[in-house]
Amino acid sequence: MVDLQNFINGQFQAPLDGTYLENRNPATRESLGAVPDSKAEDIERAVTAAQAAFPAWSATSPEQRAGWLHKIANSIEANLEEFAALESQDQGKPISVARTVDIPRVVANFRFFAGAILHEASESHHRPGSINYTYRKPIGVAGLISPWNLPLYLLTWKIAPALATGNTAVCKPSEWTSLTAFRLSQIMADIDLPPGVCNLVFGTGPHAGAALTGHPDVPLISFTGGTATAQAIMSASAPHFKKLSLELGGKNPALIFDDADLDRHLPTLVRASFANQGEICLCNSRIYVQRALYAEFVERFVAAVRLLKVGDPSDPLTQIGALVSEPHWQKVRRYVALAKELGATVHCGGDVPELQPPFDRGFFLNPCVFTGLEDSCPVIQEEIFGPVVTISPFDNESEVIQRANNVRYGLAASVWTQDLSRAHRVAQALQSGIVWVNTWMNRDLRTPFGGMKASGMGREGGHYSLDFYSETQNICIEF
Ligand code: NAD
């Protein structure tokens, strides 16, 4: 059990009003300790500390900042097993996912931006008698708000570029999954990161989150989370003209053509649907299969899904852990009930598995596959963000493109075909910030990451992050 404290100005501090939230292990409902329920006055302290640290931090050289990021990365890597265990207990994810995906990526985030800042170059534009050059400078205090599904992975995807570019930060991790962010703050304290450079304030969205997004001295907000929350953040930011990066929800289609190489790709398609209990913003939730392959696909896919091992997240063989919280578990179950009411065929799952104590009290759900639903129904239109996928047949390319695009989201899509021309044609026609062809979640951190439509605004990754976390200035000199 760990009772967390805020990390402000290099010091661990209780929330000023002394209130806490209970943190529970979603696999057992056992208490993991308390999380500060911070309020505006805690955010105020953190912003003041970050402002005070800004002049000195922004004046450090890229080499110095890269050095700090490498120190953080090395310390996390040295404690990878501990971080993985904490992430699994706090979020419900299988330990194998925390160990091989979440925490290695946390280390990679710091190392990537430590390298990126050393290789940053800016443009210059020459004409007779004058030269323009682009100067990028740090902005100030960055407000960084992250969700619960990939807790430290997504938070550090923001912290690393924010600090690399010379900003200071106030972070507000999800109240459901704050443990590894707290452990990160201990590492920052251990390595003596200058006080105030990175502050972590724990608490809920309406209290701590809203205080951060509405704060007049936080000129930049990077937010990953739900689309409805982003609307509130945009409104709170508008009076202050804040720079915003919004990474939001998805309802990601997989388009499987009848020439797809199922022997090779079936395991990836199963992972793409159910990794992390389907609680990855990039997971497939709508699978469209060309009619000639449809029956075979459903049979083989469902057979593979039935083999997924659900249960104790700390068991290295577990593939599906617990959903993050009771409210989220209930939400996903309501969609399962709705699909049944709408007459869907349930091929597998959707029920609560029978597990041995203490896991019989956890928020588990067997991975669920539906067919027979209309595209217009809420189960196919709305983000469920759990282990639930629908499969629908299609006849031709233009039809499936239209159906894939026919949702409000546009985050990620995948196309499965051996026809190269079709792969390009379809990928370019999809309204999706990211399209994978014959692969899924194959990430190169240099690429632009972000969504179209209600899935987000702006791109992060590589120089897109360096641009976002900097103010770009053009300087023109006549000679
Ligand atoms: P959420 O929007 O409920 O919460 C995200 C964060 O915002 C939390 O830290 C929360 O405390 C905070 N927050 C809530 N209300 C706020 C407010 N009014 N002002 C400021 N902050 C506030 O999302 P969630 O349930 O934690 O995460 C799931 C969502 O995140 C899904 O929609 C998922 O698709 C999305 N997501 C998107 C990406 C991406 O890269 N596009 C990645 C992961 C998750």
Image: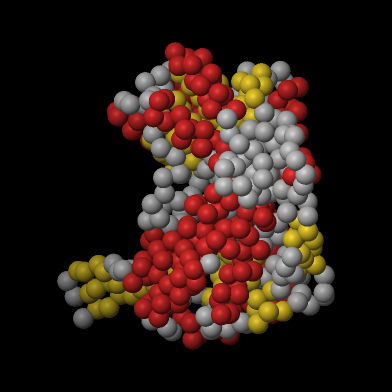
| Quarter of the rendering containing residue 171 | bottom right
Seen at 40% across and 63% down, the residue is: 112
Seen at 25% across and 67% down, the residue is: 125
Percent from the top left, x then y, of residue 426? 39, 30
Q: Which corner quadrant holds the N terminus? A: bottom right
Residue 266 lies, with reference to residue 236, above or below; the image says: above
Colour mode of the rendering: secondary structure
Residue projecting furthest to the left: 128
Q: Residue 308 versus residue 91: which sits nearer the camera?
A: 308
Q: Which corner quadrant holds the C terminus? A: bottom left
Percent from the top left, x then y, of residue 39? 76, 70
Is 349 left, or right, of 28 in this rendering?
Answer: left
Residue 22 lies, with reference to residue 421, above or below; the image says: below
Is 172 left, or right, of 192 in this rendering?
Answer: right
Residue 154 lies, with reference to residue 312, above or below; the image says: below
Question: Can the viewer see residue 358 in this picture?
Answer: yes
Seen at 72% across and 34% down, the residue is: 353
Percent from the top left, x then y, of residue 340? 73, 23
Is 341 left, or right, of 399 in this rendering?
Answer: right
Percent from the top left, x then y, of residue 463? 38, 61
